[in-house]
Image (spheres, helix red, strand yellow):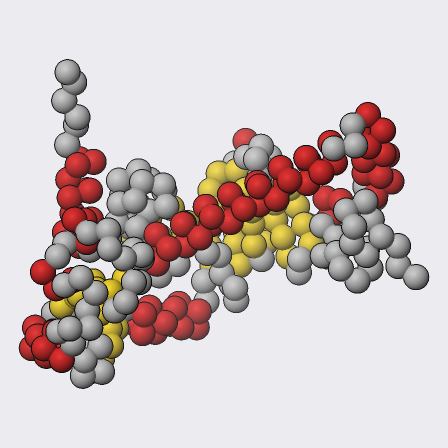
Amino acid sequence: MSKRTFFGKKDEEDKKEKQIALVDQDNELEKEISLLTKEDKGSVSKVISEVEGTIKEATKASIRDVKLLEEGRCPSCGRKTRQFLFTTVCEYCGWSTFITPEKGHALIHLNDGNIVESKSIFKIVQGDLLGITDDVVRVRIPAGNISHIEYAWTDEEIAGRREQRRREERVVCDWCQKEVERDEYVAVIYAAVGTHQMRYQFCSEKCKRAFEKQYPMRIHRNCYETSCAECNECVKKYEDEVTLEKLEEKKERPEKKA
């Protein structure tokens, strides 16, 4: 039979896969919980509530970051980012994220001239690097011993990423369904059919006007002539381009002191 834990879930059926950090911590956890329960019966419930609150806030932050990245915006400052094949960089605040080769590997160049090869690497809090191959940490290198890191991409992986990026940068017109490159002329409408804001993209001004003519009454609160910055009649998902430009101008202008 599976026993129930202090948190009211069966440890064999309901709990998630045990984190490596918790291995061999079961007995210690039970002692801590027993001590809390004896001193204050409400303490355990309070701790669980705090954990759930932390998870909820972290989830909100993760969703926010993902949405900003989807819009080509920096999760740190909100400015537009520059996209490279395997890297995203914000030129304004320096935030960046990158992926390591899946088919290639990483070469860690040391100050003494030696090179350590690893499938993937992670920088930990102390600044040291963990070299991981086949899901196993094979090496930990102190930060002071590292000269630089080289990423060895395969030609196949680079070609695959170029093709993926080409597909991502193409826009399908919401009127004629024609596929065009993102750097070609693309008209955009931010409008709400009902209560939720949507973004419609068009390959030409002609398709944009045809869309507006076809749906003159269904668009919520006359979105065609109303700036999203001046409207709170719907649930916003996007900021329109005018709003984003104003926000960027405001950030660039230093505030005058009284």
Residue 108, can we see it? no
Residue occupying image coordinates x 52% and y 54%: 106
In percent of width and height, residue 82 lies at 28, 52
Query: Is residue 215 placed above or below 40 in the rendered structure?
Result: below
Tally of marks: 0
Residue at 26% across / 45% down in the picture? 79
Q: Nearer the viewer, residue 101 or 191?
A: 191
Depth check: 187 or 129 in front? 187
Question: In this orientation, which residue lies closer to the viewer: 92 or 186?
Answer: 186
Q: Quadrant of the N terminus?
A: bottom right
Q: Nearer the viewer, residue 84 or 57?
A: 57
With 144 as the anchor, is 239 left or right in this view?
Answer: left
Q: Is residue 197 visible?
A: yes
Q: What is the quadrant of residue 247 in the picture?
A: top left
Q: Residue at x 29, y 55 (%)?
A: 236
Side of 196 where 13 appears, left or right: right
Counting from the top left corner in percent of width and height, residue 162 is at 34, 69
Residue at position x 25%, y 73% in the image: 170
The image position of residue 73, as x and y in percent, is 30, 50
Left or right relative to 76: residue 203: left
**Residue 40, picture quadrant:** top right
Where does residue 6 sit, x and y in percent of width and height? Answer: 81, 44
Q: Outermost residue, top direction? A: 258
183 in relation to 233, above or below: below
Image quadrant where one finds the C terminus:
top left
Q: Is 117 above or below relative to 24?
A: below
